[in-house]
Amino acid sequence: MKRECLTIIGTAHVSAESVEEVKDKIYELQPDRVAIELDLARYTKLKKSMMGIEEDDSISVTKIIKENKVGLFFVTTVLSYFQSKIGDEVDVAPGSEMVGAIEAAEDLGIPIALIDRNINTTLERALNRMSFFEKIKFLFGILTTDTDDEEIDIEDLKNPDNLEDMLEMFKDEAPGIYEVLVHERDAYLAGSLLRIPEDRVIAVVGAGHQPGINAYLDHPETIPPLEELNKIEDKKGIPWTKIILALIPILFVVIFFLAYFNGINITWNLYQFVAISMIMGFLGSILSGSKIQSALVGGLVAPLTIIHPLLAAGWFSGLTEAKYRKVRQRDIKNLANIESFRDLWNNNIFRILLVVIGTNLAVSIATLVILPSQVFIPLFMQIFG
């Protein structure tokens, strides 16, 4: 690719004007290749949608939990909800400008280059970079953004001054995710463009990436190897939260053993521990609106999950609930159309997550409040009193 022959079109992803701008520019310049801000998975999904091919839209919650992708799935769901809601407000489907670019390129027989990084790689790298407080602030900021309070002017988002202010605020609030979602992807997109063999190229990217891409293309020596940007980084540092959470059940076990070796009859205390754990697991699930089967599972596994720091009763009740509530892509899309609690209650994603959260919350109350006061503190007093 020749730098001087590159045309970058910065778009808003839910803008009708961007769709027309993209198509008009491709028809006008008729480049050797059209580069679009998509990876292979998103491109394939978009093409099937364009062709009217309906995919199996079921989502395996079991697979998500087994592969430890719960956080990734939740972030993807939240981002999908946010983009869909804005798209509904302006009556433009997210990704329409990419569809326009594909249609124009295919009409002219121009090959397409996919220049973006796999979305799962991007999100996993972002989650690994973010601190716990950054994750809370980021999700809280998205979930509390109200697009109904004022009229949305998507075209204002493409204004360089507005973009700079927005990105600077984003950088201050969540520097870890900013680095991955913006800075890293700028480098990846620029590096992908440099690998295109044709000279005359039109690149269709989000307007927020345009300044960063230009900066990297002006100084290509600063672009990291794309292979490095595709690696899933291991989390660094000491996992203090996990250590603290692990110490609680360990302390419970130690108290039981100390009481036993000091000749204290712990049979009744064990019965109390199991009964309280099971009752709280059951109540947390059933009060969250679960099926009776899910509540029974949540109750049965609660004693074990309290002792095992890497297990959570909510995941078991949630998995059971998922067998009765099939989650589909439309459940994610329908999040944008929720206007009442009834709509929310009828959404399977919300219901399963509610069961998970409710069960875990009840078991946490048992672990942190009821069991210490009713079982372990009395035992501790008998041992050392």
Image (tube, rainbow, N blue to C red):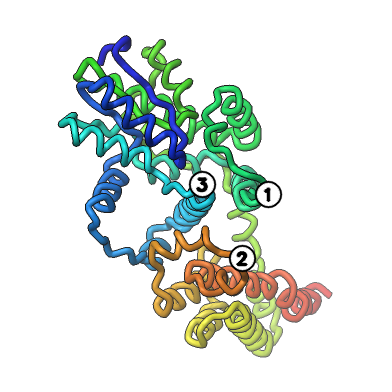
Q: Residue at the spot x=24%, y=56% of the render?
A: 52
Q: Which residue is mark 1?
A: 149
Does dot 1 land on a helix, a strand or a loop? loop
Vertical relation: 72 (above or below) 129: below
Q: Position of residue 155 (x, y in %)?
A: 53, 33
Does dot 3 land on a helix, a strand or a loop? helix
State whether residue 71 appears in this view. Answer: no
- Whichever of callouts 2 and 3 sits on the residue coming sooner in the sequence is 3
Q: Which residue is mark 3?
A: 90
Of residues 25 and 311, the one nearer the viewer is: 25
Q: Residue at the spot x=43%, y=76% of the render?
A: 325
Q: Position of residue 178 (x, y in %)?
A: 54, 33
Classify residue 117 by image quadrant.
Answer: top left
Label 2 to label 1, Cα distance in Å?
A: 49 Å
Left or right, residue 285 beside residue 220: right
- Tell me if mark 3 has few (under 14), some (14-19) or many (20+) residues whose alpha carbon lies within 10 angstroms of its own: some
Mark 2 or 3, closer to the camera = 3
Q: Position of residue 242 (x, y in %)?
A: 58, 55
Q: Position of residue 37 (x, y in %)?
A: 35, 34
Q: Which residue is mark 2?
A: 250
- Tell me if mark 1 has few (under 14), some (14-19) or many (20+) residues whose alpha carbon lies within 10 angstroms of its own: few
Label 2 to label 3, Cα distance in Å?
A: 54 Å
Amino acid type at image mark 2? Ile
Amino acid type at image mark 3? Val
Q: Residue furthest left?
A: 109
Left or right, residue 273 beside residue 206: right
- Tell me if mark 2 has few (under 14), some (14-19) or many (20+) residues whose alpha carbon lies within 10 angstroms of its own: some
Left or right, residue 154 beside residue 149: left
